[in-house]
């Protein structure tokens, strides 16, 4: 040991990165203990691959004239809907389109819808939670009373009334679901977390160092609110996919193809109550249920990681 | 308590009016109005169109019109349905509201009670096969695509087993030449059910105050007497077949909504119970040597109930949505089906009316949940 040890300054981003990796590793270890969460993750990955496989299949094996999910028609089969066969693994719908292709094509939109509305929710909920916890007083009262109002509003009837009056596509739907759940329950949960963050010493330190309100909220509070927001994102994804499916099933959206719409077509063509043509109804319904359940299970498993009181040990 | 109630009622009134305002101005923001549609013919002079506008009150500013609408609404004039033209909206709602209320109230009560009991037991025996099956069953019920679930119920109970009818409120063939209307029967059925339930609960409450030996007897009597009495009453009334017809149509929708709402409550109760079981006072209660059943039911479950009750507040919106979906699949002519049918053909007065009634239902059940919370948690009552 010499007294001339040179101190090599480690860049800040590297410290942050290693801390992040460490927390991810320990979080993953806890997450992996729970088989329920792993099953959910597995299902999500499966659907991800399912969605990715569609464009590849369309450009290689499947003839677009027959297998296109919206415009396709199989001339070689006399009667549609056809039973599942080697040519159409899940059969065809009453309009002569391949059901497997529709199922795969819709998957990507379900992901886009779920993730878009979840991101909108998280942005709104964390901002409201942080701002109202940080300032307190009048701002807090106003924002929280508004949140109370939004929680009281029933979700599906609003969407039904709205979509009957305006043209609702995937994007508008994602925005509305995101905004409604962002101003709803998620904001309250994030705010209660923000209240515990607000009294931590590093916030005080940041203020003494001369940080402004905006800087403190967005640089110091938000990173600590993100884990809990991420957890609630999962539940928002479930809600968004479910709401889209129900609205499309009622025929209230202008989406060109989705799982809910596949069931809507089954209904409008009069095959809904005919249980012998199960291949029209079951694949899409099962896909909706599985993907919703998968995001919900991952959310529950994350809940056990974030909330120490639920752990087994 | 009264201050709290007053504050909540005021808040509810504000919510409802904001609610109506949002929908009203959303409709108003649509391009074109009814006068444009009625005077589509280019031969009609613009002056005539203006006259029609003035007659319908469309030339006045939106705010003034909205206030008129609110005034009409709260004096019981909800307008006339476009779909079933001269029928006032209020009449349609009056006919359909009891049907939705029965579905919603019975499903909420049963699912909450069953979820509480099973969640409690499942958290107590943690681990192993039971935990995974119950979690998977609960999550499946909670996230299942509701229309599909309802269809599967129809498939199982109405098609495969052929025990129950597939849908609708009643079987029209049976009602040909019936001396009473279905709604008269239905209202009386609700009254009977309420009386029976009240007597059963009174018996349960009394039996808890009795010595242990007599309890079973009193419980049995307080269950059998009112149920038997109700059946006898309807048998003798001469319209028993109609009652049975409506009741058999009622079973499947109620079962579906109940099962859907049950999954969420059960999961929430289990999670909440798991958190409570880690508290120090549970350890103390066990260390005192209390029997497991007492620790579970008196010490843990009562405290674990609080978050579940809060969860109930959040899930009310969910069960109302579930009710709408179930009404659609079962063609159950309630408010939800009215809202959906009106929305599909842009029957604005009926859609607005049904929507506002559903909003009121949600607000009222929130109030009931909040009052229940104050009774469950003494800390809230004191402050």
Image: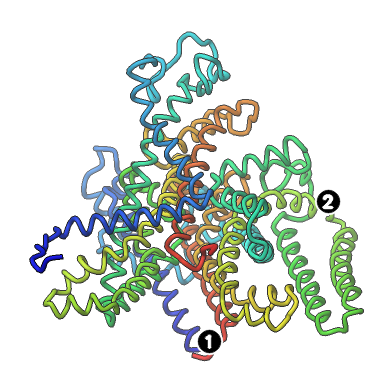
Q: Nearer the viewer, residue B48 or B270?
A: B270
Task: Give the percent coordinates (x, y) of residue B353.
Answer: 47, 59
The residue that mark 2 highlights is B241
**Residue sticking out furthest to the top:** A76
Q: Is residue B309 visible?
A: yes
Task: Give the percent coordinates (x, y) of residue B257.
Answer: 62, 53
Q: Which mark is residue B379?
A: 1
Residue B198 placement, left or right of A68: right
Residue A53 placement, left or right of B190: left
Above/below status of B1 relative to A168: below
Badge 2: chain ID: B
Residue B122 placement, left or right of A22: right
SS at mark 2? Answer: helix
Task: Give the percent coordinates (x, y) of residue A84.
Answer: 56, 19
Residue depicted at 87% across the width and 77% down the height:
B215
Query: How far apart are labels 2 and 1 at the CA level?
Result: 51 Å
Residue depicted at 49% across the width and 48% down the height:
B340
Residue depicted at 31% across the width and 49% down the height:
B35
Task: Give the percent coordinates (x, y) of residue A265.
Answer: 49, 31
Q: Which comes sooner in the sequence, label 2 or label 1?
A: 2
Q: Nearer the viewer, residue B96 or A202?
A: A202
């Amino acid at each position: 040991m010499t007294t001339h040890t040179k101190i090599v300054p480690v860049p800040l981003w590297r410290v942050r990165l290693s801390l992040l990796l460490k927390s991810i590793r320990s979080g993953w270890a806890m997450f992996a203990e729970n088989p329920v969460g792993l099953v959910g993750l597995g299902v999500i990955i499966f659907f991800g691959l399912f969605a990715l496989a569609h464009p590849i299949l369309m450009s290689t094996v499947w003839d677009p004239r027959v297998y296109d999910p919206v415009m396709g028609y199989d001339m070689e089969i006399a009667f549609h809907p056809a039973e599942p066969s080697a040519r159409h693994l899940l059969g065809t719908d009453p309009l002569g389109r391949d059901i497997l292709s529709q199922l795969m094509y819709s998957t990507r939109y379900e992901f886009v819808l779920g993730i878009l509305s979840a991101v909108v929710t998280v942005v709104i909920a964390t901002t409201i939670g942080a701002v109202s916890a940080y300032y307190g007083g009048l701002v807090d009262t106003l924002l929280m009373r508004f949140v109370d109002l939004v929680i009281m509003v029933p979700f599906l009837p609003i969407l039904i009334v709205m979509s009957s009056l305006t043209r609702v596509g995937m994007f508008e739907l994602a925005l509305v679901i995101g905004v409604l759940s962002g101003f709803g329950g998620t904001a309250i949960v994030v705010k209660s977390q923000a209240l515990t963050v607000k009294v931590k010493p590093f916030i005080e330190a940041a203020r003494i160092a001369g940080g402004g309100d905006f800087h403190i909220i967005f640089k110091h509070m938000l990173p600590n609110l993100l884990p809990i927001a991420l957890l609630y994102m999962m539940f928002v994804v479930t809600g968004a996919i479910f709401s889209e499916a129900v609205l499309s099933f009622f025929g209230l959206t202008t989406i060109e193809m989705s799982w809910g719409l596949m069931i809507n077509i089954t209904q409008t063509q009069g095959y809904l109550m005919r249980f012998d043509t199960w291949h029209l109804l079951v694949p899409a319904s099962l896909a909706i249920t599985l993907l919703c359940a998968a995001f919900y299970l991952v959310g529950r498993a994350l809940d056990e990681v974030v909330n120490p009181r639920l752990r087994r040990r | 308590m009264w201050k709290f109630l007053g504050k909540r009622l005021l808040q509810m009134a504000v919510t409802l009016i904001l609610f109506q305002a949002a929908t009203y101005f959303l409709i108003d923001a649509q391009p074109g109005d009814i006068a444009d549609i009625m005077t589509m013919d280019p031969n009609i002079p613009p002056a005539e169109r203006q006259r029609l506008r003035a007659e319908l009150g469309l030339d006045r500013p939106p705010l003034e019109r909205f206030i008129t609408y609110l005034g009409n609404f709260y004096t019981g004039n909800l307008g006339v349905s476009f779909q079933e033209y001269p029928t006032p909206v209020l009449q349609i709602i009056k006919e359909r509201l009891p049907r939705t209320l029965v579905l919603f109230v019975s499903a909420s009560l049963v699912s909450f009670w069953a979820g509480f009991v099973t969640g409690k037991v499942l958290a107590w025996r943690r681990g192993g096969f039971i935990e995974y099956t119950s979690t998977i069953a609960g999550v499946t019920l909670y996230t299942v695509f509701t229309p599909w679930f309802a269809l599967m119920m129809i498939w199982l109970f109405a098609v495969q087993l052929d025990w129950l009818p597939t849908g609708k409120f009643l079987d029209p063939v049976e009602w040909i030449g019936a001396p009473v209307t279905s709604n008269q029967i239905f209202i009386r059925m609700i009254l009977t059910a309420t009386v029976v339930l009240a007597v059963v609960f009174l018996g349960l409450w009394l039996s808890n105050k009795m010595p242990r030996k007599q309890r079973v007897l009193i419980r049995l009597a307080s269950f059998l007497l009112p149920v038997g009495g109700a059946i006898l009453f309807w048998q003798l009334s001469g319209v028993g077949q109609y009652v049975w017809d409506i009741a058999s149509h009622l079973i499947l929708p109620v079962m579906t909504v109940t099962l859907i709402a049950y999954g969420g409550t059960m999961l929430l109760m289990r999670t909440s119970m798991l958190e409570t079981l880690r508290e120090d006072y549970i350890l103390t209660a066990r260390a005192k040597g209390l029997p497991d059943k007492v620790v579970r039911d008196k010490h843990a479950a009562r405290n674990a109930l609080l978050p579940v009750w809060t969860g109930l507040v959040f899930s009310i919106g969910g069960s109302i949505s579930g009710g709408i979906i179930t009404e659609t699949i079962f063609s159950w002519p309630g408010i939800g089906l009215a809202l959906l049918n009106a929305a599909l053909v842009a029957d604005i007065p009926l859609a607005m009316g049904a929507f506002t009634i559903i909003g009121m239902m949600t607000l009222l059940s929130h109030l009931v949940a909040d009052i229940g919370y104050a009774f469950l948690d003494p800390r809230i009552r004191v402050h």
